[in-house]
Image (cartoon, grey):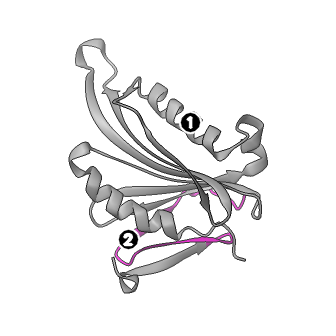
Amino acid sequence: MKDSDCELVALYGFSAECPKNTRVELDPKSTRKKGNLVFHLEEGFKVFLSWGSLGEAKKHYATAAEQASGSLQRSIKSARGKLDGAAETRNLKFRDHDAVYTHARMLMEQGGLPFFTRRVTQDAYALHVHCHDSERYYVVYAFARPEVSDELARAFEPIMSSLKCHSS
């Protein structure tokens, strides 16, 4: 994707770039301290950007890696799922902050009745960042069926890599 195909979305001192044809939705309960944005991409994908208090996150997770692992486990548990193979996890420095990139394939249960439950496969992509400058954590994440997972990865990467967690 060329830079001219993207535009900047900025809020509360952080920003990310997204394709110009993206519809951006702010959760109405969002505040400077905690919130969610959804990037509705033309391809039909949704990429989520969440933020919250780093101090609150650190009460449960000392590092971005611990938070990423906890998020993955919560996703699996909430959908009564399991990992399909090992998750790809990379610890990295993101704008001089500790961050973790995760790609996992999960088998999830859909439906609530025992006779109507089925397993579906879903890929999850996530970037967890702990920013001491803004005193926030950030999570960029998205889900897709395996047959469109590569398309989602290509759409997810520019939003993830363009995240600026503080203005200076």
Q: Residue at x 34, y 65 (%)?
A: 41
Residue 29 at least partly seen: no
The foreground one among 27 and 96 is 96
Secondary structure beneath label 1: helix
Q: Is residue 119 magenta?
A: no
Locate residue 79, reporting x and y percent: 41, 28
Locate residue 40, reporting x and y percent: 38, 62
The residue identified by callout 1 is 69
Chain-order first, disc 1 or disc 2: 2
The quadrant of the image that shows the N terminus is bottom left
Give amino acid for label 1: Ser
The answer to whether 132 appears left or right of 51 in the picture is: right
Work out whether 116 lies above or below 68: above
Q: Which of the 4 quarters of the picture holds residue 19?
A: bottom left
Distance from disc 1 to disc 2, alpha carbons, whole Å, reads: 29 Å
- Label 1: how many residues lie within 10 Å, few (<14), some (14-19) or many (20+)? some
Q: Are marks 1 and 2 in contact (CB under 8 Å)?
A: no
The answer to whether 90 appears left or right of 85 in the picture is: right
Q: Which residues are magenta?
A: 11-34
Locate residue 2, reporting x and y percent: 35, 81
The foreground one among 49 and 35 is 49
The foreground one among 167 and 79 is 167
The residue identified by callout 2 is 22
The answer to whether 36 appears left or right of 133 in the picture is: left
